[in-house]
Image (tube, rainbow, N blue to C red):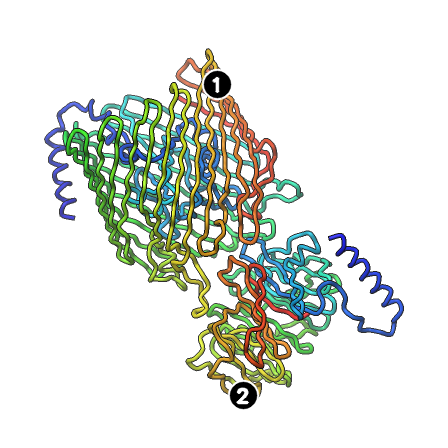
Amino acid sequence: MIRIVFFFLLLCYYSVANAQKSTDSIQKLDEVVLSDVKLKHYNEGYKLTVLSDSILRKNGNSLTDVLRFNSNIYFKENGYGMVSSASFRGTNASQTAVIWNGININSQLNGQVDFNTISTANYNSISIRSGGGSVQYGSGAIGGSVHLSNDSDFTKHINHRLQLGYGSYETENASYNLSFGNNKWSGSAGVSYVNTENDYRIIGTDEKNENGAFNNLDLNLNLGYILSQKDVLKVYHQNFRSDRAFSSTLLAPSNSKYETEDYRSMLEWAHVSENFTSSLKAVHLLEQFKYFENKDLNNYSKGQAKTWLIKHSYKRNVSKNMALSVITDYSYITAEGNSYIDPKRNAFSATAILNHQFSTKFKYNLNVRKDVISDFKSPLVFAGDLSYKVAEAYVLKFNASKNFRVPTFNDLYWNPGGNLDLEPEESFQFDLGHQLEILKSLQLKLNTFYIETSDLIQWRPNTETNYWNPVNIANAKHYGLEVELGYTKQINAHHFNLVTAYSYTETEDVEKNQPLYYVPLHKGNTALSYNFKSFTAYYQHLFTGEVDVIGGSLDGYDVGNIGCSYELNTAGKLNYILDLKINNIYNTYYENVALRPMPNRNFNIKLTLKF
Amino acid sequence: MISKKITLLFLAVALLFTSCNSDDDNTPEASGDYVDGLLISHEGNFGQGNASVSFVSYDFATVENNIFEAVNSSPLGDTAQSITFDGDFAYIVMNVSNSIQVVNRYTFESIATIDSGLNNPRYMAISNGKGYVTNWADFSVTDDDFVAVIDLSLNLVTDAISSSYLPEEIIALGDKIYVATGIYGYGNLVDVINSDTDELEESIVVGNSPNSLQLDSNSNLWVLSSENLIEIDTDTNDIAQTISLGDGFSFPSNLIYDNSSFYFYDSGSVYKMDESANVLPTTAEFSNVNFYDMNVSNGILYGVDAGDFTSNGELKVYDLNSNTETQSITLNIIPGGVYFN
């Protein structure tokens, strides 16, 4: 704590002393522009897939939809728009970390992220980092992590984007984004709203998706201010509100609904000097839910968790090719609700990262982290990764890590049943990657991975107490292969782009000697787009193989989407883009959670104004 | 499948033939694939729609899972809570599906699905030719609980009788119906309904969360709760005796009456008590079992073990003379009820 105060004072001194100098050079530094610097600098040995703005705009505003069609991650969605959890490399719902501008935002209550409560409308980019990341990103980064970034743009500009959409099942979309910058300031603000009846016809029956209506609102505000040539101040804020009925299954009617709210705020002070950079972040996170068993009554159960976090990152250049980073953070977390008796947690962590560029061909990072958490013992975790440029077009990557997933507030404090004797889940894993890039137009990534997880927390019936209790009981193994291929081709004014990914994932529940539930052995997706002047057309395809479920299996399926857009008035200041999209063009019947059919063929039309 | 259909056809024709020729025989032999054995209902996972019923013949030579789906080519539904029998009919109460599957108990052919007028249904009893089904409605709402009345000739819910909070097991004696209400630490009443008037007549205070109702040889009602075991004189509906649990028991459940003895389960052990006893037994008949439900007939105990609730459960058969396990049979996901067919 003393150290943090010391740095804070130091930063104040520097900012005052250097305020008069030119700010041009600082605007270009990563520490100033990026919200998650680690993602760029300490991941040489990891596969990183960045989904750019243009990809994000093709799949509506739901993170589930975007990742389903553009990554290897499998989603278990309880009917379209309902609670959605990820399985990344076959890991479970609480083993994928979601990182908002460098901060882990997995729920403190259940350890998971509902990917339908994250709107993609207000982020510059979304990155998928495959492999263990607990050292840098904390609990739950076992299969991998998904990073939401609001980067700062200090170049002089003011841009507006307004989108209005309408589609099947009375789906209304509206979003507005503003981005501005001058030499001192940068800012972005966004609002995104969706409202839908979501009563799609269930293919092969006369039934409709019952009780599936929902609406979501996402608000986002980010500001950056350059204090001096060495100091920048940034503020991030995000608020998501969701009001969803919980849809029926094929065999069980439902009349319930679920309201959630998330507030995320962060203040960051970054300082950049010749030899070191420092960043101090103060963060407040609030998540809350209300569950209505009967949506017609004002009768609900609720839960809430608040996190206060202070995080300091310090990076020192030891030599021209070597840097050492020390990251410390302290968090205080409280929860309240019908099923907890005011639990609290104090957590402190310290991380050291050595970044060494041994030669132009060979780079590596060594990471170590220790957490001290008030309610249980946390393991020392570590990671190492390297990249080696074998040839101009060929890079070899490798990473190995030990990771953890902390017991959640539900696991520890749920009343009745919570178990205070739980220990964190642990994993040990490695990943070998090959990257080929031929003539800038063809990119190939091939990764093989192995993950061993132990002490997995599962809720089991307890004959002594008659309650269900979480226990550290299961162990699992995951191994597999991923291929990612990107190809671009230009013939005169015709641009073609192909991105395709395939994953093969074997899993084993060691105790039961059987594959894990809800992990497809094969999953593949392809996106092909074509652009000619103002016209763009694209096709997306998703193949998901059969998955095992309790006492049975779900069939595999192929789903295709097709869309086109036309940009009007390209010359002037005001641009209009008209989009038409047909989802599920083959009208495929499919479920990714048992008995919860997904939508039939549906349409969406969208008008975008840019000025 | 074809051979089974032919068998069924043959049996049906045989039954027709038999019944035509024996008008005076008013108790024809039950016929179908599922006679002389146990029916075991499986809850399946809540919300996952994998409920099922298994058949196990008394000689254990035949074990068939998923019999409803096999016969009717459609899924049973979500969370099979209990089965009640009346004549040739079996009524399978589907808790999360809010329905009752009516089948022929011996062939398991579907006869009807009762799917309106029920809300969170649990257990069913038959009295005066009518069906009475306990319903929680919204768990969190204390005054919407009811007993649905079913016209068994139409298979329709015709009435709803308000009940105390969280009605569970229900048992009929003549025109009186006793309903245990309360679970998870809530509730301590046994409601008495008159099936002539279909009205709630009184509520008898018993122990907290009454979980089992049994009638003894004198037609007295025994109520096991997480506080005590109570005997109710069914002529007066007064409490005849209260046997407290003492320190040795945590959550006794599954009270069964067989051959002048009571059996019940608590924390991995099965206990036996004579119906004339006025204290609970201090030693278990046998231990180290994990029964989600059990039933007893003619000195044989049939217990079902749901395991970790995601793997296949097991039927464990115990000879109560020697208290030894004689059979262990793999069933389906979450077996929760054992019935004699």
Instruction: Tell whether B186 sits left or right of A350.
Output: right
**Disc 2 on helix, strand or loop?**
loop
Please determine whether, in this image, residue B281 is positioned above or below residue A439.
below
Picture quarter with the C terminus of chain A: top left
Q: Chain of mark 1?
A: A
Residue A182: percent from left, percent from top:
26, 23
Residue B220 higher or lower than A296, as above or below: below
Q: Is residue A592 visible?
A: yes
Foreground of the two, A379 or A577: A379
Q: Secondary structure at mark 1?
A: strand
**Percent coordinates x, y for residue A482 in the rendering:** 43, 35
Of A466 and A366, nearer the camera is A366
Instruction: Decide which of A140, A538 is in the foreground and name it.
Output: A140
Q: Kindly identify which numbered label has been placed on residue B277.
A: 2
Residue reaching furthest to the right: B21
Is residue A36 visible to the viewer in this orientation of the structure? no
Left or right: A315 with respect to A408?
Answer: left
Q: Which subunit holds the residue at mark 2?
A: B
Which residue does the numbered mark 1 point to in the structure image? A531
Q: Distance from label 2 to label 1 (Cα)? A: 87 Å
Which amino acid lies under the numbered mark 1 shown in the image of this protein?
Answer: Asn
- How many residues crowd around disc 1 within 10 Å: few (fewer than 14), some, or many (20 or more)? some
Which corner quadrant of the image does residue A321 belong to? top left
Q: Nearer the viewer, residue B68 or A220?
A: B68
User: Where residue A297 appears, x then y in whole percent?
Assistant: 51, 55
Q: Position of residue B102 (x, y in %)?
A: 70, 61
